[in-house]
Image (cartoon, rainbow, N blue to C red):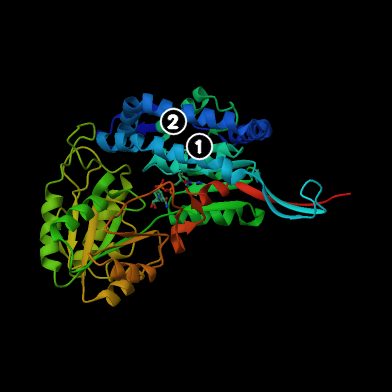
């Protein structure tokens, strides 16, 4: 696999990819390792994952640079991703014992010699496939492999082909941290190798990526009835009410839309602004976006780097052309930048409407449409007019009003006066084409366990 720097087009590495045969061999090794790994005391597994967290911190600068070079994330944002890892890992370290422990749900008669006892036990799924995306490889990978390993599963981890070097570093650090050699194995390659992994008799698949691929994954494994979780794309809306501090709301939302060059599953992708403040909001938003420093991702000052994937430049250009055709005004950017690297200018499209692709299809880039709305009901209708359902937000001073609106929105996460935010304590879950299942929170630990119901009758 040729790994190319998206900022310079320079070859970074040439890494041998797996083959269908090597994937099958890795599956066999993982199967054997899983039995032993599940028998390893939880405290030992916890200590190994704790050391992994410490190794990430100790190596953060080097790891951030690898990530920046292979996918173009500005170096400060790469460090932020690594900096947020310890608190995520700590959550899982702290909560797994409680989620895994047996629950006595019924006990009849003398507690020392019950006539009938009913217990729910939790067992690992077995060997799971973790097929991952590139945009936040530490976050989206660890949301799966950390709780999977803690709960006694073996993991076959396929990093995205756009974050392979990061995937290799993760595998290396997990081994250094003391995770049993074959309990975590990485698989290198593009979609064909992901497909080869799915052909193995795995016990579960945890996929992060686009709706199109997620659907293929679900269709492939459906006949086998294995545990399937899909964390997919979004077209996440925010509604800005007329009572907000316009400058503050614009600043926060511009960051939510353009951080990581808009390549976040929960980036703000559509804005609905109350007509009374529409013009003022657009002015403030454009003023913020125009101050963003676009440049070399290795430069500390850079806020927007190149896109990770060249093909997405055409998607964005076509969304701009379609929006202009339907009456949008390009208030900032609007095209690929004339420089080496996969750079698209941060783009603000005013006068947006739902006839435009930019308000309907995931953009996954530094571009946003802003539409004027007359009232809360119109905002609710438009926010729900989507195939996706990952996150949605409302900016308003009035908590009762925001709550009333957000209760009507079909999304897995809702935000009041914030956006583009993830917490390990809350389930990360999508509705409609944004996916099925949850990572993080207790639900995201339980996802790697299967219940066993014990019916015990004394002699
Ligand atoms: P993608 O669907 O192109 O690829 C995801 C992974 O699937 C990669 O590892 C790829 O190699 C693999 N793959 C491709 N074809 C396959 C096949 N036939 N069988 C098995 N595996 C296959 O997505 P991407 O470009 O890596 O990521 C961007 C998408 O991910 C966006 O839609 C984004 O919104 C979404 N995403 C969602 C979340 C979330 O938490 N909901 C988080 C991050 C990214």
- Residue at which label 2 appears: 53
Label 2 sits on a secondary structure element that is helix
Few, some or many C-alpha atoms within 10 Å of disc 2 (few <14, some 14-19, many ≥20)? many
- Residue at which label 1 appears: 93
Q: Cα distance, mark 1 to mark 2? A: 10 Å
Marks 1 and 2 close (CB-CB < 8 Å): yes
Q: Pick the residue in front: 22 or 221.
A: 221
Compared to 90, does 216 lie above or below? Answer: below
Residue 34 as seen in the image, left or right of residue 309: right
Compared to 394, does 255 lie above or below? Answer: above
Residue 380 x %, y %: 32, 72
Which residue in the rendered view is the most extreme toward the right? 459
Quadrant in the picture for residue 89: top left
Q: Pick the residue in front: 32 or 57.
A: 57
Residue 172 as seen in the image, left or right of residue 101: left
Residue 50 x %, y %: 48, 30
Label placed on residue 427 = none
Residue 87 as seen in the image, left or right of residue 289: right
Residue 20 in sight from this viewpoint: yes
Compared to 251, does 275 lie above or below? Answer: below
Few, some or many C-alpha atoms within 10 Å of disc 1 (few <14, some 14-19, many ≥20)? many
- Which residue is rendered at x = 20% and y = 32% of the image? 300
- Which residue is rendered at x = 24% and y = 76% of the image? 375
């Amino acid at each position: 696999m040729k790994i190319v720097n998206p900022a310079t087009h320079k070859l970074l590495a040439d890494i041998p990819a797996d083959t269908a045969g090597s994937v099958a061999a890795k599956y066999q090794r993982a199967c054997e390792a899983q039995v032993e790994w599940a028998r390893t005391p939880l405290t030992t597994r916890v200590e190994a994952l704790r050391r992994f967290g410490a190794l990430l911190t100790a190596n953060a600068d080097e790891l951030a640079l690898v990530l920046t070079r292979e996918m173009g994330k500005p170096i400060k944002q790469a460090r932020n991703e690594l900096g947020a890892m310890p608190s995520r890992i700590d959550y899982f370290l702290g909560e797994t014992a409680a989620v895994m422990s047996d629950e006595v749900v019924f006990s009849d008669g003398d507690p020392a010699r019950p006539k009938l006892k009913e217990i729910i036990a939790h067992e690992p799924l077995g060997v799971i496939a973790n097929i991952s995306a590139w945009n936040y490889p530490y976050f989206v990978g660890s949301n799966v492999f950390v709780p999977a390993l803690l709960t006694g599963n073996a993991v076959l981890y396929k990093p995205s082909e756009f974050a392979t070097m990061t995937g290799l570093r993760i595998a290396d650090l997990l081994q250094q941290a003391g995770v049993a050699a074959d309990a975590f194995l990485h698989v290198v390659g593009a979609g064909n190798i992901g497909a080869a992994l799915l052909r193995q008799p795995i016990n579960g698949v945890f996929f992060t990526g686009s709706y199109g691929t997620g659907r293929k994954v679900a269709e492939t494994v459906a006949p086998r009835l294995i545990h399937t979780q899909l964390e997919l794309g979004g077209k996440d809306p925010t509604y800005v009410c007329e009572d907000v501090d316009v400058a503050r709301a614009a600043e926060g939302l511009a960051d939510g839309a353009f951080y990581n060059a808009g390549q976040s599953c929960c980036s703000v992708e559509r804005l609905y602004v109350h007509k009374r403040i529409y013009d003022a909001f657009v002015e403030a938003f454009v003023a913020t976006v125009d101050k963003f420093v676009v440049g070399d991702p290795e430069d500390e000052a850079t806020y927007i780097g190149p896109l990770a994937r060249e093909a997405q430049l055409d998607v964005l250009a076509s969304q701009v052309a379609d929006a202009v055709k339907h009456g949008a005004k390009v208030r900032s950017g609007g095209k690929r930048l004339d420089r080496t690297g996969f750079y698209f200018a941060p783009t603000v499209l005013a006068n947006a409407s739902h006839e435009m692709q930019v308000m309907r299809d995931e953009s996954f880039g530094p571009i946003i449409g802003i539409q004027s709305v007359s009232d809360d009901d119109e905002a609710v209708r438009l926010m729900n007019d989507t195939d996706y359902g990952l996150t949605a937000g409302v900016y308003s001073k009035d908590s009762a009003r925001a709550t009333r609106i957000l209760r009507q929105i079909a999304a897995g996460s809702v935000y009041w006066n914030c956006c583009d935010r993830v917490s390990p304590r809350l389930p990360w879950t999508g509705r409609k084409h944004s996916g099925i299942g949850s990572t993080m929170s207790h639900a995201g630990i339980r996802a790697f366990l299967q219940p066993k119901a014990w019916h015990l009758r004394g002699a």
